[in-house]
Image (spheres, rainbow, N blue to C red):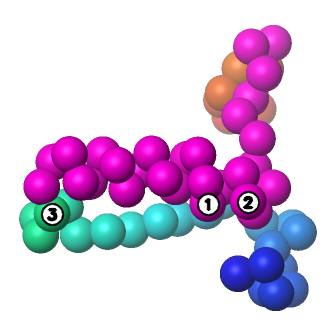
Amino acid sequence: MRQEQVLPVATDLIAQFNPVVVERDVAIRALELIATEIAPALGWKPASPAEPALAGV
């Protein structure tokens, strides 16, 4: 994904898994990995407490 040319200007990351196939705990762990490993590796950082999550919406 890091080789993707549009990554530097992308504003959204959509990740998908099939929640019907996996157990609830496995689905939650998948979401945790996206938030703690994958998204940060692509340059995402959580909003600071001073930045509302929906700023500009």
The quarter of the rendered structure image containing the N terminus is bottom right
**Which residue appears at 76% of the width and 41% of the height?**
45
Report whether 8 appears left or right of 52.
right
Quarter of the view holding residue 48? top right
**Circle 2 SS class:** helix
Residue picked out by circle 2:
41
Residue 43: x %, y % from top left: 81, 55
Residue 14: x %, y % from top left: 52, 65
Tag 1: Cα neighbours inside 10 Å, few (<14), some, or many (≥20)? some
| Mark toward the start of the polypeptide (2 vs 3) | 3
Question: Magenta span: helix, strand or loop, mainly?
Answer: helix
Tag 3: Cα neighbours inside 10 Å, few (<14), some, or many (≥20)? few
**Circle 3 SS class:** loop
Residue 36: x %, y % from top left: 58, 46
Location of residue 39 with respect to 36 vertically, above or below: below
**Circle 1 SS class:** helix
Residue picked out by circle 1:
38
Q: From which residue to which does the magenta span run?
A: 23-50
Which amino acid, by three-letter code, is at mark 3? Val
Residue picked out by circle 3:
22
- Mark-to-mark CA distance, 2 and 3: 25 Å
The quarter of the rendered structure image containing the C terminus is top right
Q: Check if mark 2's residue and mark 1's residue have beta carbons within 8 Å.
A: yes
Q: Is residue 11 visible?
A: no
Q: Is residue 53 visible?
A: yes
Report whether 37 appears left or right of 18.
right
